[in-house]
Image (cartoon, grey):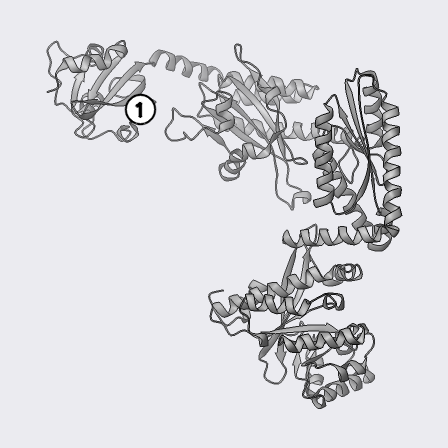
């Protein structure tokens, strides 16, 4: 038996309450203080050592199913609440491991809370959850002032849960932030609302994930079933327990039929009613309608001040703010006047959608650097104001904006800047910045005719950035031997992801990149993606077929382009016979010596070449004489007319016959869509065909699974 003199010092500070010590392995009681003996109605001198704790305290014949031994540590107390059926008493229990004579024992300190617990239960009977919900609904429906109604509702909720705070957070989907828009707090608690504005939405990501899974989020450390790690945001504001329910927006077409999280309502440090979280969920449902109405009202007000294309303030809002600033006592003012270079040229040559992208790109940079006061005041004009800051900070922001213009913006723009301190004349400073911008713009147009050179640079930069972002994807369409039905090759076709997630066909973007001389970035990307695909195909044990990659004449005019392609091919270990370079007849427009040099390079580095789109616009027979092609591809326009147009059949038949006579060039028909076309082409002894009759173009992963000949893709 342990000597009591060794136990007393351990519990001397806790001796006001009921205390016992037991062996956590054998469950044998080794010590009871006087208060515990009295609670158990033990006779003076009645022996307790060696008795089992679950028998003595709970009246059970086996260890308690709620035993907390597994939760105990020497570092801190484990606190929990329990109703003792044997003693008919509610306790708050504090458990901890203590070391005595080299062994760990369970120390438990018990506080009788029966009286307060009964009082709480009586209060819950007086104000049931149903009555509280009805009260909340009446508060929302009967008060015309929406803000006052929601504040009153939060007071009802806060008092029901006897919480420190009740609150509503709302998401701003436009800038991906979250703000505490409403709160109630009990007497003696400070308001946290000013500190919880425009927080990054990532800080409440845990709430969002939990709402998606279980519709509620709560952390109650005193309840082992629903306790959890307290997020940093709650720690910062001394919140040890928390309950929240989501506020959803209604399903709509705008969200593809899915509901979207609008915000959440919750309470901090609730001291009762924690089992009634359904109340929060019900209130959230009714609050969502009022928040929606307020948002619609605010949205209408915002739209009168915002530029719809960029989200910046519009000209009217700018003029209002300038008048407000004129009435204020400004210590300093920085002005940035911006005008987009070459916007008219872009609209005329690439279309207004691209011009809109230029405007949005400039606006994005301005909003990032000058979020406080940024406005679009004309079609291609912007202004940003820097109020009551230092000159050093203003210059730092300008440097940031210049870096954005150089490295990220898809177009160039001219800037006029001005900074003043002391006595501020807003109109003069704005006028001076406007003049400085005009001077810079004149310099720009003096060095760039119609903005074309800079536009080329901007478009190339934008294309590379889109490639890096994964906006382009390779699709593959199989080539089928018409006699055997066997797949003998495939063509790589580029797709671009649109703004709505749709896949755009090449005719929506290739011509722009080709006309502006930046298509080589896309062609080389497609070639490398095909090399990667073939390398995987070989690695997985499949039997690859040759894949054709389209190259623009513009791309092939680059310096050492064929050498670069060979280096890419060798880097991925792809045999030369598995890659085919497809070119169109426009290649004949190259200067003869350059064309001859290109063909020599193809032969030198082991590339085979296919002539694509034969018969689309014109047919340069000389190119068939002067270049060595392994394949001639009949354009879809010829195949479309086979059934009804005798002239088309004559052209196609003779072209196929010509292929047989020209060193056995493979004849391939594109765009086969029906049995009748296939039958005619077989009659003409066409070698290969491709088209929707056999398969539509497929994403590369789907293509490999379907045609790769290997199940592990």
Drawn side of residue 173 relative to residue 71, left or right: right
Image quarter of residue 34: top left
> Could you tell me how many numbered marks the image carries?
1
Q: Quadrant of the N terminus?
A: top left
Neighbour class for label 1 at 10 Å: few (<14), some, many (≥20)? few
The residue lying toward the viewer, choosing from 95 and 631, is 631
> x, y (%) of residue 396?
70, 31
Q: Residue at x 59, y 81 (%)?
A: 485
Asked if one can make out residue 637 in the rendered structure from this viewpoint, the answer is no
Label 1: which residue?
75
**Image vertical order of residue 234 relative to residue 664, above or below:** above
**Image vertical order of residue 377 relative to residue 463, above or below:** above
Image quarter of residue 154: top right
The residue lying toward the viewer, choosing from 429 and 443, is 443
> x, y (%) of residue 685?
68, 88
Name the secondary structure under disc 1. loop
> x, y (%) of residue 653?
75, 87
Drawn side of residue 23 relative to residue 125, left or right: left
Asked if one can make out residue 79 in the rendered structure from this viewpoint, the answer is yes
């Amino acid at each position: 038996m342990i000597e009591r003199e060794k136990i007393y010092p351990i519990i001397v500070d806790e001796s006001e309450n009921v205390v016992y010590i037991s062996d956590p392995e054998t469950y044998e009681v080794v010590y009871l203080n006087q208060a515990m003996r009295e609670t158990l109605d033990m006779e003076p001198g009645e022996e307790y050592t060696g008795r089992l704790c679950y028998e003595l305290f709970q009246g059970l014949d086996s260890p308690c199913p709620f035993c907390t031994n597994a939760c105990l540590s020497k570092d801190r107390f484990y606190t929990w609440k329990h109703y003792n059926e044997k003693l008919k008493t509610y306790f708050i229990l504090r458990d901890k491991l203590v070391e005595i004579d080299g062994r760990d024992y369970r120390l438990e300190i018990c506080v009788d809370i029966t009286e307060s617990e009964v009082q709480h239960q009586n209060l819950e009977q007086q104000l049931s959850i149903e009555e509280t919900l009805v009260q909340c609904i009446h508060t929302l429906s009967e008060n015309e002032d929406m803000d006052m109604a929601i504040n009153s509702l939060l007071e009802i909720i806060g008092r029901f849960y006897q919480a420190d705070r009740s609150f509503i957070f709302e998401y701003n989907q436009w800038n991906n932030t979250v703000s505490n828009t409403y709160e109630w707090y009990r007497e003696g608690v400070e308001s946290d609302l000013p500190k919880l504005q425009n927080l990054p939405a990532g800080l409440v990501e845990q709430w969002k994930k939990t709402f998606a899974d279980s519709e509620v989020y709560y952390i109650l450390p005193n309840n082992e079933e629903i306790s959890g790690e307290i997020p940093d945001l709650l720690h910062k504001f001394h919140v040890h327990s928390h309950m929240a329910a989501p506020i959803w927006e209604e399903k709509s077409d705008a969200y593809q039929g899915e509901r979207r999280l609008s915000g959440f309502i919750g309470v901090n440090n609730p001291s009762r009613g924690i089992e009634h979280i359904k109340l929060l969920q019900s209130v959230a449902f009714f609050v969502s309608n009022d928040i929606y109405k307020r948002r619609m009202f605010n949205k209408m007000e915002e739209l009168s001040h915002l530029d719809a294309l960029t989200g910046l303030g519009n000209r009217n809002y700018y003029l209002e703010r300038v008048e407000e600033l004129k009435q204020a006592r400004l210590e300093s003012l920085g002005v940035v006047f911006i005008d987009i270079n070459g916007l008219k040229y872009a609209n005329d040559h690439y279309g207004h959608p691209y011009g809109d992208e230029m405007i949005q790109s400039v606006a994005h940079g301005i909003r990032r650097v000058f979020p406080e006061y940024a406005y679009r005041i004309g079609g291609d004009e912007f202004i940003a104001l820097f109020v009551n800051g230092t000159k050093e900070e203003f210059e730092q922001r300008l440097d940031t904006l210049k870096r954005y213009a150089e490295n990220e913006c898809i177009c160039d723009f001219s800037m006029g800047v001005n900074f003043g301190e002391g006595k501020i004349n807003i109109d003069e400073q704005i006028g001076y910045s406007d003049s400085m911008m005009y001077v810079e713009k004149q310099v720009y147009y003096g060095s760039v005719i119609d903005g074309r050179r800079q536009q080329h640079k901007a478009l190339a930069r934008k294309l590379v950035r889109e490639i890096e972002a994964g906006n382009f994807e390779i699709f593959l369409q199989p080539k089928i031997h018409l006699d055997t039905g066997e797949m003998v090759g495939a063509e790589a076709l580029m797709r671009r992801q649109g703004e709505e997630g749709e896949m755009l066909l090449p005719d929506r973007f290739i011509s722009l990149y080709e006309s502006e001389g930046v298509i080589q970035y896309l062609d080389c990307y497609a070639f490398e993606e095909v090399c990667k695909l073939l390398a995987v195909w070989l690695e997985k044990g499949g039997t690859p077929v040759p894949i054709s990659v389209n190259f623009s004449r513009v791309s092939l005019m680059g310096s050492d382009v064929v050498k670069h392609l060979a280096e890419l091919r060798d880097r991925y270990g792809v045999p030369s016979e598995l890659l085919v370079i497809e070119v169109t007849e426009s290649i004949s427009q190259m200067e003869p010596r350059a064309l001859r040099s290109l063909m020599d390079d193809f032969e030198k580095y082991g590339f085979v070449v296919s002539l694509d789109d034969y018969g689309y616009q014109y047919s340069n027979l000389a190119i068939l004489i002067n270049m060595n092609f392994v394949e001639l591809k009949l354009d879809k326009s010829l195949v479309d007319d086979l059934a009804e147009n005798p002239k088309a059949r004559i052209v196609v038949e003779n072209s196929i016959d010509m292929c047989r006579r020209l060193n056995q060039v493979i004849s391939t028909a594109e765009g086969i869509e029906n049995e009748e076309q296939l039958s005619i082409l077989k009659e003409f002894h066409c070698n290969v065909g491709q088209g929707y009759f056999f398969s539509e173009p497929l994403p590369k992963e789907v293509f490999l699974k379907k045609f790769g000949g290997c199940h592990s893709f």
